[in-house]
Image: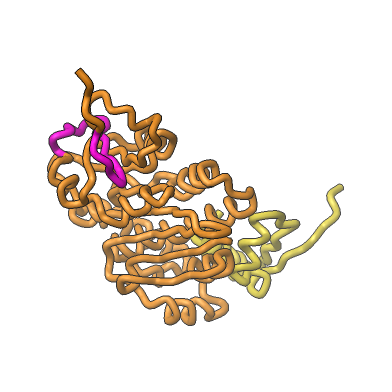
Amino acid sequence: MTLAAPPPTRALLDAGRGVAASALAAACSRLGVRVPDDGEDWRRRGVPCLLVSADGEVELDAGLKPPYSGYYEWHPGLPMAVSDACIDAVSQGGLAVSMTTARAYGLQLAAIFAGALAWRLELAEAMAADIEMALQEAVANALVHGNLGISSEPRGDAAGFRAYCATIDDRLADPLLAARRVEVFGVPVPGGVKVTVTDEGLGFELNRELAREALVGEKWGRGLRIISGLARRVETLDGGRRVEMTFV
Amino acid sequence: MDSAALSMLLIARDQAHTRGVEIVLTNPRGRVRQLFDLADIPAMMAIEERERP
């Protein structure tokens, strides 16, 4: 008996630790992708595959290495909301990460992602370092100012900085805010890479924030200026909930 | 090192200033120097290049 070839797909969702393959069915049907068939040799065929797992750091590392092209954190009880953008990123030969704020905060996500992207796309060392530095700012903005909804303004003195840190801890203890997602994608473009960071906050207006950051002497808010100095092009989309940075 | 660390440096600068002390950043190199330049730190804090003994 010959097994029928598995149907072609632009990407696969693979169930990692703490996730039953059946839990992926609804997401697969919405996204027009599928889980690997039993015994399907997708690893050798190079079909892009996103690892969906309840495990944190270990599976994040696994998801960013071949044969996987990304990691989606999911726990029973959370909505299974793998985004089209996530699937687009992996099916275009890129890398994707989608994590809750609770899990991403305190992880060196920028360094981990930039390292994996540099290896995957064989980026020059200088470009990889620029991406890591810009991602550090973009991810911190997405988590703290976007998902946790905290302004950076109180950071004027040591007491303000302590209050700011305490506010972060308070907001992380709010399960609704802690469950908001940050997504990071890196996709090859001619001569370089486009890196995208999305959050679920209120968004911001890039030019207004850059003008505000230009106030010399202020002790807060330099992230966007740093990003703009490192990336060839920076754009905000979706009302400022998505930042796209192009490095060439 | 990121922009949060730069905020802390500027807060430390102000705290030192109230005690009559100036903080000087010495021989920043590589990515740290690049970060200082991108964030316009040389306009706000003293930076010195010194010969190593």
- Residue at the (31%, 47%) spot, across then down: A10
Give the residue furthest to the front: A1
Near-viewer residue (A128 or A45): A45
Q: How is the image coloured?
A: by chain
Where residue A185 sits: x, y (%)? 40, 53
Residue A99 appears in view? yes
Asked whether, in this view, residue B51 is left or right of residue A214, the answer is right
Where residue A181 sits: x, y (%)? 28, 54
Asked whether, in this view, residue A100 is left or right of residue B42, the answer is left
Where residue A6 sits: x, y (%)? 24, 34
Where residue A91 sits: x, y (%)? 36, 49
- Residue at the (44%, 36%) spot, across then down: A65
Main SS type for the magenta part?
A: loop
Asked whether, in this view, residue A125 is left or right of residue A177, the answer is right
Near-viewer residue (A10 or A84): A10
Near-viewer residue (A161 or A44): A44
Q: Name above or below for residue A62 compared with residue A130.
A: above
**Quarter that holds the N terminus of chain A:** top left
Q: Which chain is yellow?
A: B
**Quarter that holds the C terminus of chain A:** bottom right
Q: Which chain is orange?
A: A
Q: Name above or below for residue A45 compared with residue A156.
A: above
Magenta span covers which residues? Answer: A6-23
